[in-house]
Amino acid sequence: MKFTFIDVAKESFPVQRLCQVLGVSPSGYFAWRSRPASSRQREDLVLLAHIRSAFARSNGTYGSPRVTRELQDEGLTVGRRRTARLMRENGLKARQKRRFKRTTDSHHAFPIAPNLLEQDFAAERPNQKWNADISYVWTSEGWLYLAVVLDLFARRVVGWAVSDRLHKELALEALRKALAIRRPGEGLTYHADRGSQYCSTAYQTELKKHGIGISMSGRMLSHLSRPELGCAADSLFQSFSYCG
């Protein structure tokens, strides 16, 4: 282990000095370097390459349990302790989860529509019930906000918009895209939370102009508007989430 440390640190410090600090002889270090790698060491090098790849794909957010699962899904035989050791020895430490970013502002003076769906998110046909929501996604360039509109009949995204800022036009852009793509007729109920983006005058006017019934979650359910304990869009957003 000491020789491994010296091998890594020799780019920054003299080998003689490192050996002196760690209490080993330079001749012992050079003898260690000239030895062929053991089969275990060769396996570690292969595993480390896979670990670095999985860690990079997660933008540095995966810890050893998640990285281990990724490697096992790739068909590699590896345990969490070995993964944790290789990550620790190579300085691969997962970043902590970023703090929660609020996307729903329910403190506003806009009128609130009643909850027409009453948690009944089953749809018998397309363009019968739509669900709108906004979430955020971390990228290498920072936070991106994603607004979506889902048709609850097939849980299919029919409208979307992305921006690096959370503003009222984001939800409106997703709605207009959905209307242009689907051109729904009468009988559509549109469900969202009580956020100011959905209660704004411009948004409500757009819905009424197309004869769409407006439904909003109750106060206690504004963050639980998804079917089966949550927003229909949440199952989509969860595919973008990450955990260490």
Image (spheres, rainbow, N blue to C red):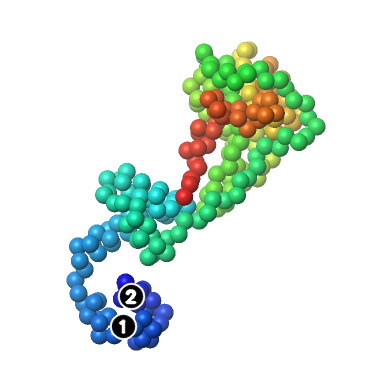
In the rendered structure, the answer to whether residue 83 lies left or right of residue 206 reads: left
Q: Amino acid at mark 1?
A: Val
The answer to the question of whether label 2 and label 1 lie on touching residues, with beta carbons closer than 8 A, is yes
Q: Which mark is residue 4?
A: none
Say if residue 15 shows up in the picture: no
| Residue 56 in the image, given as x and y percentages of width and height | 42, 54
> Which residue position holds label 1?
24
Q: Is residue 111 left or right of residue 3?
A: right
Mark 2 crowd level (few <14, some 14–19, many ≥20, 10 Å Cα): few
Q: Which quadrant would residue 178 be assigned to in this image?
A: top right
How far apart, in angstroms, are the residues tagged by discs 2 and 1? 8 Å
Q: Nearer the viewer, residue 1 or 76?
A: 1
Is disc 1 surrounded by few (<14), some (14 to 19) or many (20+) residues within 10 Å? Answer: some
Q: Is residue 208 visible?
A: yes
Q: Position of residue 141 (x, y in %)?
A: 55, 53
Earlier-in-chain disc, 2 versus 1: 2
Instruction: Give the residue pinned by disc 2.
Output: 2
**Residue name at image x 64 percent, y 28 percent:** 221
**From this viewpoint, which residue is outermost toward the right?**
109
Q: In the image, is 151 to the left or to the right of 64? A: right
Q: Residue at x 40, y 82 (%)?
A: 13
Q: Is residue 242 above or below residue 31?
A: above
Q: Secondary structure at mark 1?
A: loop
Query: Which quarter of the image is occupied by the N terminus?
Result: bottom left
